Image: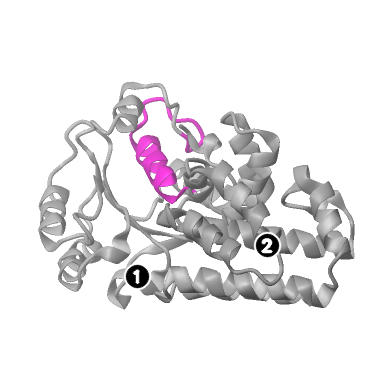
Amino acid sequence: MSFSGILGQGRAVSLLKRAIETDRLPHALLFTGLKGVGRCLTAITVAKALNCLERVEGDCCDRCPPCNKIAKSIHPDVHLITPEGATVRIDQIRTLTREATLKPYEGRGKVFILDQAETMTEQAQNALLKTLEEPPQATFLILIAPEASALLPPIASRCSQIRFAPLPEGAIATRLREQGCEEGEATLLASLAGGSLGRAQELRKSPLADVWDLVGQAFALPPGRSVPILDLTERILRQKETVPLFLEALLAWCRDLMVSKVTGHQELLVYRNRAAALRGQSEGLALRQLLAMYRTVKQTLDGLGRYANPRLSLEAMFLTLRDLQAA
């Protein structure tokens, strides 16, 4: 893939292409932003553009031997460093620093991409400092982290930072449709992705059909009975990894209920293919009830991130939602 294939990062791509075209690319770059917005893909494309034999206006051809080798992760001058276990270890950085002193084997420049750089141990970051302070000629380091503050100040200060923006929902939905996703599912996934195409693609691999079915049941709990709540909780907990996904989907449904209640505009809905069901539910509830239901789901989702008990949290949420609907 060339820079033209990078989704939604026009500013970052423009800066990088201009720097490569004029031979002014900084030797140390820090790519920050959400996971799944194209930071690593862009770093690999930078490596291609630096070593491409048919480069045009700072972009790679994506066809020549160096481009193909980099795409297949077999180019001897391009190295991707990822955590071993939970962290990037000092031994990995020591190997990097030794390799960085050597001349390129066959390319124009050596490129080291440190993915999840925020996981570097303090010792590893200190070991990297000298290479950042005195980068060898024709050597480029690209660190990828969520924020500059996730790194030690001496590391971040020696890198030129490029911020990657969250992707628009429309752009994510379009790319998902290009990859074979159905219209309604693409729109829903894009809304749940939080600006990350990678997140949307991960969600697509989840058992979505089961999740959407459970969302519908959450708003069909009979008043005064607890057994259906216990049964629904049990079904959700059979696949614990989908609990956050279920709550995000439920939160989107609550949001759509309010949109349907206030505006009635179908094009503003996440669940556009279920507009009739949303309209029917929202008509029977006051806006204050819908707001309280949204807050209840949001608090439950936030609580999971603080190690709350999933079973107790879900049961309490369903009880509250049932009572709010009956109020």
Is 164 located above or below residue 106 in the figure?
Answer: below
The 10 Å Cα crowd at callout 2, few under 14, some 14 to 19, many 20 or more, is: many
The quadrant in which residue 152 appears is bottom left
Q: Position of residue 130 (x, y in %)?
A: 18, 66
Helix, strand or loop under label 2 = loop
Is 54 contained in the magenta span?
yes
Q: Is residue 82 left or right of residue 60?
A: left
Helix, strand or loop under label 1 = helix
Q: Does the rendering let one see residue 123? A: yes
Between residue 120 and residue 224, name the one nearer to us.
224
Q: Residue at x 44, y 51 (%)?
A: 39
Q: Residue at x 60, y 54 (%)?
A: 192
Q: Which colour style is shown?
A: one colour
CB of mark 1 within 8 Å of CB of mark 2? no
- Which residue is under mark 1? 156
The 10 Å Cα crowd at callout 1, few under 14, some 14 to 19, many 20 or more, is: many
Q: Residue at x 29, y 70 (%)?
A: 155
Is 100 located above or below residue 304 in the figure?
Answer: above
The tag earlier along the polypeptide, 1 or 2, is 1
- Which residue is under mark 2? 221
